[in-house]
Amino acid sequence: MLSPSVRLAICYLLLFFAVLSCLIDFVAIGDGDGAQTTKEARRLQIGVKKRPEVCDTKARKGDVLHMHYKGTLEDGTEFDNSYKRGDPLSFTLGSGQVIRGWDQGLLAMCAGEKRKTGDSSGAGLRNNGGHHRPFQETQLVTFEVELVKIDRKTELVKEGTFSRSRRRGWRELRRASGVLSHTIEE
């Protein structure tokens, strides 16, 4: 059996290696113009530009979001703009229909909120539907986004599904006249 001082030394050694491994994950990389930024920060940056005073519903995975956006390259060149088309983009959040930076960066957003996201094109932009993209893989792409509307999707539950909670025991979910109900059995 190890003495308490040896066990403590082993714990400190393990802690040291855990911290060291975390630091290695955040090694600074260059972005081509001399500026240094961490690898994770280079992938996705999110900033809130405007928040509504009242927010009853926050975006979550599975919601259909209606967004206006403007996309620009690092040099300021605009490559896409839904405002000019007058038609917001609609997509299901978290389903992979848009770039990964949006699926991650628009969670908990409120209708009327505006955000600015920066995403390196290699971290989620892809060639959708054969459209040519006018930027390089390592280029930072910035989007100014505005959430116009959230369509909340309710979870679908199959009739006859059983679930269990610690306090209530087993219960069966049923649909009666279109209303979800459950039977609790102890």
Image (cartoon, rainbow, N blue to C red):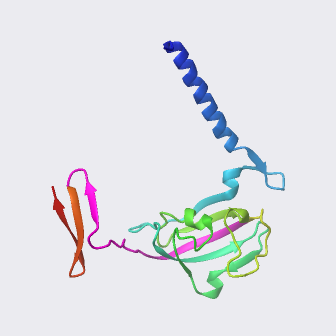
Place residue 49 in its image quadrant.
bottom right
Task: Give the side of residue 14 with respect to residue 183, left or right.
Answer: right
Q: Position of residue 96 (x, y in %)?
A: 57, 70
Residue at image position (68%, 73%) is: 71
Q: Position of residue 20 (x, y in %)?
A: 66, 34
Q: Which residues are magenta?
A: 141-168
Task: Give the side of residue 99 with respect to residue 94, left or right.
Answer: right
Residue 32 in view: yes
Residue 49 in view: no
Residue at image position (72%, 81%) is: 130
Is 169 one of the magenta-colored residues? no
Place residue 77 in its image quadrant.
bottom right
Query: Camera-side residue: 25 or 85?
Result: 25
Query: Is residue 6 depicted above or below 15 in this figure?
Result: above
Query: Is residue 128 depicted above or below 113 in this figure?
Result: below
Q: Residue furthest left?
A: 186
Task: Give the side of residue 167 with respect to residue 147, left or right.
Answer: left
